[in-house]
């Protein structure tokens, strides 16, 4: 189960949801940068399970223990290694799933791929628990990028059919996005936050789940970052984003909405702004030909409804080879999109930092 990505910033994650610990190794980080550990902890708290009634009730502190690569809060240049202990596993909740796979989780495919001995308690290595190490690495990347004038913020564009206020893709209100980061429902429109809260509480009561769309914006990117064809900004972002569980789609700028429109409606016209070349619209999401054009990078990530729902579902017994009904236990998110916002920010930061390493010798 290889779990790594990155060329100049190489990230790997390890562990399982109900194992002793999860963690990660990050190679290629620059030497001598001080990391604000309190800020990193606050970032991790945005993703951590059990923070409020709207998420899984499994409570984990998610405080990383740094084993190497950081001395007195400063990156030492050697590989960064860290772990997060698991403290609240209820593994017996998963006993019946050894024989009866949950619809739309990885129970069935993991067994077909790795056999009966695979550890799928809590989703094992496939679990979203593995997004905690991604947030440790990405939280550090976000701080390093900010030193270079690059800001990355996300929001919940949609939960179920409830949509947040649209963002301006040319001049995004980054402060407004930063201000909602600590909200349990990261929407700019407070009325929509209330609607989502009511929806999620109802789903929780009904034992059901829903999906959503996370939208992330990155500003301050230099023009000319990326590559054509198979190694562009979209390519590397998509590869890593699809490593986050429950992601079913990635789009950029005008995305799929653009596909039914005319070129004359959606082409981003060039214009001079003082001595800078810019565009009047940003349907390209800041990327053309796999390369940044200096406009904000805007990306939407489609997230499916949580597969583990408490309603009775149809499945099969793997041992008996017959249809059966399944009722699950465990502590699950009624809508995983709520906790996915910092994860997508983290992954975006890691991929951008990786690209900066192509042109920035300090990062090599
Ligand atoms: C932040 C986050 C939290 C998640 N929480 C749960 C959960 O509580 N229960 C669950 O069944 N799936 C949860 N998932 C999704 C599953 O891990 C995922 O659907 C499963 O591993 C199968 O992978 P796939 O959906 O990418 O095919 C979560 C995903 C994310 C990103
Ligand atoms: C523990 C986390 O989320 C877990 C992600 C998850 C899944 O299937 O992805 C299933 C649940 O696991 P368990 O039933 O073992 O509690 C969530 O709680 C976390 O995000 O840290």
Image (cartoon, rainbow, N blue to C red):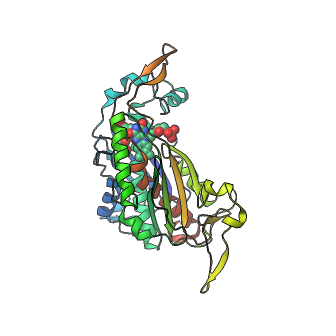
Q: Nearer the viewer, residue 317 or 83?
A: 317
Q: Which residue is found at the position 28% from the left and 38% from the top?
A: 88
Vertical arrangement, residue 230 with respect to residue 98, above or below: below
Farthest bottom residue in view = 274
Q: Nearer the viewer, residue 56 or 20?
A: 56
Vertical arrangement, residue 21 with respect to residue 285, above or below: above
Farthest right residue in view = 263
Vertical arrangement, residue 362 with respect to residue 209, above or below: below
Q: Is residue 295 left or right of residue 30?
A: right
**How far from the left and from the top, in percent, is residue 71?**
32, 63
Residue 40, by quadrant, is bottom left
Whether residue 326 is visible here, answered yes or no, is: yes
Q: Is residue 226 left or right of residue 329?
A: right
Residue 356, by quadrant, is bottom right
**How far from the left and from the top, in percent, is residue 120?**
42, 31
Q: Nearer the viewer, residue 241 or 162?
A: 162
Whether residue 67 is visible here, answered yes or no, is: no
Q: Which residue is found at the position 39% from the left and 66% from the top?
A: 178
**How far from the left and from the top, in percent, is residue 314?**
48, 23
**How far from the left and from the top, in percent, is residue 326?**
42, 23
Vertical arrangement, residue 221 with respect to residue 315, above or below: below
């Amino acid at each position: 189960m290889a779990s790594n990505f990155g060329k100049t910033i190489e990230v790997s994650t390890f562990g399982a949801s109900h194992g002793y610990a999860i963690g990660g190794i990050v190679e290629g980080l620059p030497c001598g940068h001080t990391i604000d550990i309190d800020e990193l902890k606050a970032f991790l708290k945005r993703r951590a399970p059990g923070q409020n009634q709207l998420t899984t009730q499994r409570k984990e502190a998610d405080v990383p223990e740094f084993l190497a690569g950081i001395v007195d809060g400063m990156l030492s240049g050697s590989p960064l290694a860290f772990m997060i202990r698991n403290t609240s596993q209820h593994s017996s909740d998963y006993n019946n799933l050894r024989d009866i796979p949950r619809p739309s989780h990885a129970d069935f495919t993991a067994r077909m791929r790795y056999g009966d001995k695979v550890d799928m308690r809590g989703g094992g290595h496939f679990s979203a628990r593995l997004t905690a190490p991604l947030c440790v690495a990405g939280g550090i990347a976000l701080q390093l990028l900010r030193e270079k004038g690059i800001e990355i913020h996300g929001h919940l564009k949609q939960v179920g059919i409830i949509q947040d206020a649209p963002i301006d893709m040319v001049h995004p209100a980054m402060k407004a996005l930063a201000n909602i980061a600590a909200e349990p429902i990261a929407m700019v429109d407070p009325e929509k936050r209330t609607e989502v809260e009511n929806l999620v509480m109802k789903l929780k009561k009904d034992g059901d789940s829903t999906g959503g769309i996370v939208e992330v914006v990155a500003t301050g990117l230099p023009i000319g970052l990326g590559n054509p064809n198979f190694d562009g900004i979209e390519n590397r972002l998509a590869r890593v984003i699809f490593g986050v569980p429950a992601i079913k789609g990635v789009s950029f700028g005008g995305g799929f909405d653009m596909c039914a429109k005319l070129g004359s409606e959606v082409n981003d016209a060039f214009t001079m702004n003082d001595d800078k070349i810019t565009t009047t619209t940003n349907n390209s999401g800041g990327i053309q030909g796999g390369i940044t054009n200096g406009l904000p990078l805007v990306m939407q990530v489609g997230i499916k409804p949580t597969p583990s729902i408490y309603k009775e579902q149809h499945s099969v017994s793997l041992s008996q080879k017959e249809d059966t009904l399944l009722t699950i236990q465990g502590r699950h998110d009624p809508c995983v999109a709520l906790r996915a916002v910092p994860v997508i920010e983290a992954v975006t930061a890691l991929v951008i930092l990786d690209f900066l390493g192509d042109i920035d010798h300090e990062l090599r």
